Image (spheres, helix red, strand yellow):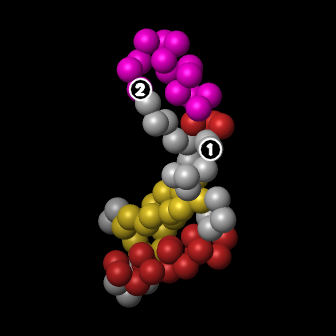
Amino acid sequence: MTYLVEVYVLPLPELRDPQGQAVEGALKRLGFPVSGVRVGKVVRMRVEAPSAAEAERLAAEAARKLLANPIIEEFRVKVLE
């Protein structure tokens, strides 16, 4: 079966996020009452697997091996369909 999976990658909370800071500053200048903005990436993929749990496991393995840098980033996986 094919599952649609998203991997969300963000900078580690304890690290500075220059992109997030820039976006936060711009949003504030536009009048939006925001704080704590973090900028990351979303990787969406279709995964062939016998179950949703296996699709999630495979996507997490891909994130650990390629999609996220564990020194500076964290990730989470969500199976959409």
The magenta stretch is 21-34
Image quadrant assignment for residue 33: top left
Q: How many numbered marks are there?
A: 2
As for residue 81 lying within the magenta part, the answer is no
The residue wearing badge 1 is: 16
Q: Quadrant of residue 79?
A: bottom left
Q: Is residue 79 visible?
A: yes
27 shown above or below 62 = above
Q: Residue 34 bears which disc, if any?
A: 2
Q: Nearer the viewer, residue 42 or 45?
A: 42
Q: Where in the figure is residue 37, as x and y percent of width and height?
A: 49, 36
- At x 55% / y 79%, what residue is drawn? 61
Q: Which element carries disc 1, helix, strand or loop?
A: loop
**Which image quarter is the N terminus in?**
bottom left
**What's the amino acid at mark 1?**
Arg
Q: Is residue 16 above or below residue 67?
A: above
Of the residues shown, which amino acid type is indicated by label 2? Val
Q: Is residue 42 visible?
A: no
Image location (x, y in percent) of residue 66 = 66, 70
- Which label belongs to residue 70? none
Name the residue furthest bottom: 50
Looking at the image, residue 25 lies above or below residue 41: above
**How far is mark 2 from mark 1, CA to CA?**
17 Å
* Mark 1, other Cα within 10 Å: few <14 / some 14–19 / many ≥20: few
Which quadrant, please, contains the C terminus?
bottom left
Residue at (62% x, 44% y) in the render: 16
Residue 72 percent coordinates (x, y): 64, 59
Labels 2, 1: front one: 1
Crowd around label 2: few <14 · some 14–19 · many ≥20 (10 Å)? few
